[in-house]
Amino acid sequence: MSNMVQFTSDNLLFIVPIATIIALIVAFIFIRQIFSKDKGSPEMQAVSDKIEEGAMAYLKRQYRTITIIAVVIAIIIAAIGFIDDFKNYLNYKVAIAFVLGVSCSILSGYIGMKVSVNSNIRTSAAAMRSLGEAFKTSFRGGAISGIAVSVLSLAGLFSVFYVYSIWCNDMTLTLHSVVGFAFGASMAALFAQLGGGIYTKAADVGADLVGKVETGIPEDDPRNPAVIADLVGDNVGDCAGRGADIFESTAAEIIGAMVIGLAVFKYNQSLNFIYLPLVIMALGLLASIVGILCVRLKNENAEIIPALNKGYYVTMALVVITMIFSCYWLLKDITNINWVNFAVAGIVGIVLGLIVVYVTQYYTGDHKPVKAIAQQSESGPATNAIMGLSVGLESTVIPVICIGIAIVVTYALGFFSVNGGSFTLGLYGTAIATISMLASSGFILAEDTFGPITDNAGGIVEMSNQPKKVRNRTDKLDAIGNTTKALTKGYAMSSAALAAFLLFAAFFEIIAEKNDTGIETEMNHVILSNPLIFVGGLIGAALVFFFTSLAIRAVGTAAGEMVQEVREQFADGLIMKGQKEPEYGRCVDIATRSALKQMVVPAILPILTPIIFGILYRYVLPKEFQHISPYAVGGLVMVATIVGILMANFLNNGGGAWDNAKKYIEAGNHGGKGSFAHAAAVVGDTIGDPFKDTAGPSIHVLIKLLSTICLVTAVLYVV
């Protein structure tokens, strides 16, 4: 199969570089607009400088750790290429793509961090003048991050794909090599998301338990030694971590869809099945930019949520239009294919994203579940915790039903797009649904990064003792930011669910290529009634639980050190009397050291588990059973994906509900701040923090990393 990538009017691939160039121009204009704004008073700048210093110091040390591990893995991948049985699937080309994936992921996190720490101070200064200006500054700052990460993902992947198509001169070998890019992105994202989540929650828990509960001082009070570490954590967790997460999501899912497109190519001999995901994402990037430009407040008293919703709906409408156009243009001339079915599948994926976002909003917003947790807080921390667990568990039901319906419908649409039906086209229908959902990722990430920027802005205003009206403006923005961050997690979870199924199928396409069979034949071998495959499923389920345990424990360990440090600084009473300055640097250093130390084992776990398990089956079992190895690994990935989707949803929504129940009480309900119910809600929020900001988001990456590592190493398990 000798096929090089070419730019023609039939495949619309020229849209990819055009879209990235336009996006970079818009991002550059936004940067000029934001960086031209003033940075406020010297007191505000002093706080901002401490945040930036701590954030960049953490990133530098984290990226050093990731780089060392990535180099070791790349060397191993390249070395395996010297073994004849594996050289077409694992070799130095895959290793290079892996390194590029890691590098682009690191760069996406760095950009997200750099933009955030330079936008927060300017948002604080803008809040001194008007809410509208502060909102525009913070949202445009988030937009820079969203656009930059989307460009890096699309342009980075497309560049590697284009160069490798020339280098390999074979589409199968090209895609097998480019899979390394997705693996690199997934690995770096897990470290970034996990490490950032441990850091931010260790600092947050330490600041809240000692500052707000034991000492009774407000949030972001400059007397709290952990407050700078807490503000730094917002950046390393919600900006650098989430940026790497979204980068990994788009890269992995585009490659997964392209691998499924390769299977369809064998059925119908059209490379447009491979190119279509790239075109949809490129046009989706342009749609996100238009949506971002539509977000603005008409006046000081205008509501922010409707303004954001307007941009979101514009983005979604344009994504639908461009996706339908893409399906029509690339698939219309392919014999016997009904392109309309794939366009409808894309719409189903977009609708699924909307539904899951609104379900998330119901369980984590100002609605019955959150109010029920607040009500139970009047009885104490125990009943608060019980109700929070109940809400989190309940919140898994509707999203799973919707995801299940979406997979069945999109598979059926693809299957019946040709007379007589086709298994591979059925999978391709789900692939188009997944890509269509992700096409709006630029706008979604803009909303997500808007959250920590406004949170930091509020902290800067509080710590520099600005007038109350300024804090009221940043508090209003922060409240909206908390909502957008929660919605983004719902979006990430639903896209991860479809993506994991997609990558699972792509894994068996590579197995089928090695065995010279069909993808349907290989997937049908994953029968959980087979005890050897059932064991793989058990290990996959246990892996998710063990990973979650390690992530939550890491926060508890790091938070324990932080609490001890803050208590020691408060012990002599001099800070509270204003006779001594808090030593912020010590808390920042504790959070940094703890996060980096605690992230390594849980991040390595999902890389080693399927490899060790598959190799043991392949080389240790009796010869009669060794052929089961790839199907047992498939069972491991499949069950881990199912359990991971449920666990991530439970952790994200349960933690978000606890957080907003606390905020609901702080707004004056059930006794307000300082009441017995408030103290109970703070305890519940402390439990929920590692759920929603560390373990939950990390599981999104975990289930995709499991699939990408198996995509890369699939050849190791085939007899």
Image: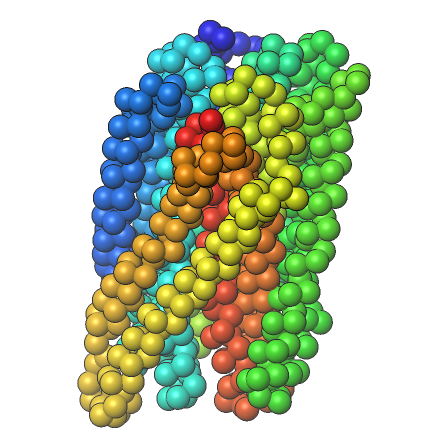
Q: Residue lying farthest right?
A: 419
Residue 510 showing in the rendered view:
yes
- Residue 642 spot, x, y in % from top left: 60, 49
- Residue 435 spot, x, y in % from top left: 59, 34
**Number of marks in the rendered image:** 0
Q: Considering only vertical position in the picture, is 86 above or below 288? A: above
At 65% across and 12% down in the image, what residue appears?
A: 268
User: In the picture, residue 248 is in which quadrant?
Assistant: top left
Q: In the drawing, does residue 158 fall left or right of residue 680?
A: left
At 69% across and 25% down in the image, what residue appears?
A: 423
**Of residues 93 and 209, which is closer to you in this image?**
93
- Residue 422 spot, x, y in % from top left: 72, 21
Q: In the drawing, does residue 695 fall left or right of residue 118?
A: right
Q: Considering only vertical position in the picture, is 439 above or below 94? A: below
At 37% across and 21% down in the image, what residue appears?
A: 85
**Of residues 672 and 388, which is closer to you in this image?**
388
User: In the picture, residue 716 is in which quadrant?
Assistant: top left
Residue 21 showing in the rendered view:
no
User: In the picture, residue 177 is in which quadrant?
Assistant: top left
**Of residues 673 and 210, which is closer to you in this image?**
210
**Of residues 626 and 81, which is closer to you in this image?**
626
- Rendered image coloring scheme: rainbow
- Residue 299 spot, x, y in % from top left: 58, 58
Q: In the drawing, does residue 432 fall left or right of residue 13?
A: right
Q: Residue lying farthest top?
A: 2
At 74% across and 43% down in the image, what residue appears?
A: 405
